[in-house]
Image (cartoon, helix red, strand yellow):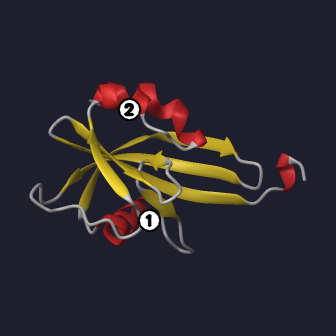
């Protein structure tokens, strides 16, 4: 199957920054990522971002700005991701891991050292610039 035949998955992700640190999450397969998920029918990327963070981490967030796009082709699908810089509505809210195995409030120097999903690797310098 060539890249033209692959299904495209649309995803929204949150770059949640709090006190100079970025929230990253570890999937059960061991890879780290920006939290987020798939856009549902009739939903905007922004709505998806807010919903997914509530579902996955039990956090209420505010979208501050559009961070950028990430397009990546995996062997069995194409990823179209929109990323937003976000902040916590209540800074005292605790992260609840509903689908991930771990979380890290990462400093800039932490980002290159984690096992990122292949698509997310190119984001490291831009994410470091946020912090």
Q: Residue at x 73, y 55 (%)?
A: 77
- Residue 5: image x %, image y %? 86, 56
Mark 1 element type? helix
Relative to 130, residue 83 above or below: below
- Residue 9: image x %, image y %? 64, 59
Near-viewer residue (30 or 44): 30
Determine which residue is flagged by label 2: 111
- Residue 56: image x %, image y %? 37, 67
Q: Quadrant of the C terminus?
A: top left
Q: Is residue 64 visible?
A: no
Q: Is residue 48 visible?
A: yes
Give the residue furthest to the bottom.
41
**Left or right: 72 in relation to 63:** right
For the residues labelled 1 and 2, the Cα–Cα distance comes to 25 Å
Q: Which label belongs to residue 48?
A: 1
Q: Residue at x 25, y 59 (%)?
A: 61
Q: Which label belongs to residue 59?
A: none
- Residue 67: image x %, image y %? 41, 39
**Left or right: 92 in relation to 61:** left
Q: How many numbered marks appear?
A: 2
Q: Where on the picture, by quarter, is residue 54?
A: bottom left
């Amino acid at each position: 199957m060539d890249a033209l035949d692959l299904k495209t998955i649309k995803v929204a992700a949150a770059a949640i920054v709090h006190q100079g640190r970025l929230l990253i999450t570890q999937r059960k397969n061991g890879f780290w990522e920006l939290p987020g998920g798939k856009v549902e029918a009739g939903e905007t990327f922004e709505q998806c971002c807010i919903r997914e963070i509530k579902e996955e981490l039990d956090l209420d967030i505010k979208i501050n700005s559009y961070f950028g796009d990430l397009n990546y082709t995996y062997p069995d699908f194409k990823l179209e991701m929109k990323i937003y810089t976000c902040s916590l509505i209540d800074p005292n809210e605790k992260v609840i891991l509903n689908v991930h195995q771990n979380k890290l409030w990462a400093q800039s120097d932490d980002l290159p050292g984690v096992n990122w999903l292949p698509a997310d690797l190119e984001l490291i310098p831009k994410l470091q610039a946020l912090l």
